[in-house]
Image: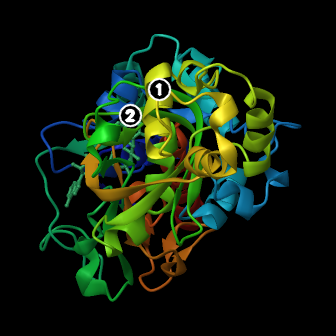
Amino acid sequence: MANVVIIGGGAAGCFCAAILSELHPGWPVSVLEAGPRLMAKLSVTGGGRCNLTNSFAALCPDSPADLKRVSVKTLEQVYPRGAALMKRALSSFSQWDCCKWFEDHGVELVVQDDRCVFPRSQDAMQIVRTLERQMRLGGVRIRCRHKVSSIGADLLIMPGELKPDAVVLTTGGGTAGILRDTGIELVPPVPSLFTFKVGDDGLRSLMGTVVEDAALSIAGTRFHSSGTLLLTDWGVSGPATLRLSSYAARYLAENQYKATLLINWLNCSEGEVSAWLEVMSGGARLIANCHHPLLSDRLWRHLLGRAGIRNDCRWSELGSKGRSRLISVLTADSYPLTGRAAFKEEFVTCGGVALSEVDPSSMQSRKVPGLYFAGEVLDIDAVTGGFNLQAAWSTAWVAAHAIAQSLS
Ligand SMILES: Cc1cc2nc3c(=O)[nH]c(=O)nc-3n(C[C@H](O)[C@H](O)[C@H](O)COP(=O)(O)OP(=O)(O)OC[C@H]3O[C@@H](n4cnc5c(N)ncnc54)[C@H](O)[C@@H]3O)c2cc1C
């Protein structure tokens, strides 16, 4: 009988314990959790509804179930860090395996139009209770208020206690420092998934404006994203912003969150905008009164101001200089990015255990035999949409199966 200790009772730790308890119901498996209760964060995910995975259909529209045909480069659109490892982990435990596991354990699921998967109950506590029930049935020992302060290369968790046969570290983002005595390489943690503060009063005065399909980029870099953009009283938010914050998380941290944000308000090329202006040009109507159908009246007037076009200017008076200024503002409007703001505390950490330290077929440490990793403690993180929890489920499943196999 193997003795397994899981450090961290979050999504990854509890799922790992649940899987181990199914594979080997008699094994002594313990979960050590620093907080007063298990899965506190999981219980508030997805605004309390728990977006537990994603259909990934946006990445493979022709064959939604088949991630094998998706390249690592494509997977980087959702896993900016850890895509190669995730491709492998998903081939062992995919998004559909995740859905099946929870459905087999009595959780009905719904796939929304935006491809996010939630419990039909819309209640994250149903996911928490399901994992708790499986751990209870499998005899997993739970010890809350039990913070582990360091792990040595000998895997001794507490002096005087039985040395475990395997330890799984699932302590979440920003906690990998617990490994400082092992010599395992750690990637410094920085936040991901945040909104941007923008130093422009004009833009902030448009608070509440939604642009359905804008493209964002950071000047002088390859980082870009597209999607819905929300203007706030501090700057910009919405899916396009969160995605860009994830792609550029490390770059922005290194630059103290100071950069130039470029907004393409119509997510169109200069040629496409020019063709639209061609259609509008020449008429006697006021430019200010004929906004592009995808932009609000208020935003249009703001953009005309930035292009130096007066409110009483008519299309026939625009001229080639005004026209090129307007094209430039519509496709590459630039604003100073002055800092980051939290997204309702819904952020993840990029950084953690360097993936070069981990055998992807087992999640076992290459340096410390018997030490396994799962979840956000690894240098894996994703954009929003259920991908972060899928990383926790997949890596925990791989670790549990590898332990079960190696210790049987
Ligand atoms: C508000 C919010 C909403 C989110 N919503 C979603 C969503 O809908 N979908 C999605 O995919 N992702 C979401 N995420 C991200 C997702 O919650 C995380 O990626 C996921 O919880 C990571 O799981 P984990 O088990 O690795 O870490 P965690 O869930 O953070 O669990 C780690 C556990 O380890 C414990 N611990 C830490 N240090 C020690 C120690 N030294 N000793 C013992 N125990 C320790 C912690 O107390 C914690 O319970 C959300 C995140 C937040 C903050």
Q: Circle 2 sits on which residue?
A: 231
Residue 148 lies left or right of residue 346; in this view the side is left
Residue 28 lies left or right of residue 265; in this view the side is left
Badge 2 residue CB within 8 Å of ligand 1: no
Q: Circle 1 sits on which residue?
A: 210
Q: Nearer the viewer, residue 378 or 5?
A: 378
Measuring 46% from the left and 28% from the top, which residue is drawn there? 311
Q: Residue furthest right?
A: 62
Mark 2: amino acid: Leu
Q: Residue furthest bottom?
A: 183
Quarter-wise, where is residue 47 in the image? top left
Residue 291 lies left or right of residue 164; in this view the side is right
Q: Quadrant of the N terminus?
A: bottom left
* 121 is higher (above) or lower (below) than 324: above
Disc 1 packing (10 Å; few <14; some 14–19; many ≥20): many
Q: Answer yes or no: do the residues labelled 1 and 2 have beta carbons within 8 Å?
A: yes
Quarter-wise, where is residue 255 in the image? bottom left
Residue 78 x/y as whole percent: 60, 50
Q: Of label 1 and label 2, which has the lower sequence position?
A: 1
Residue 398 x/y as whole percent: 58, 56
Mark 1: amino acid: Val
Q: Secondary structure at mark 2?
A: strand
Q: Spatial distance from mark 1 to mark 2, Cα to Cα?
A: 6 Å
Q: Is residue 20 visible?
A: no
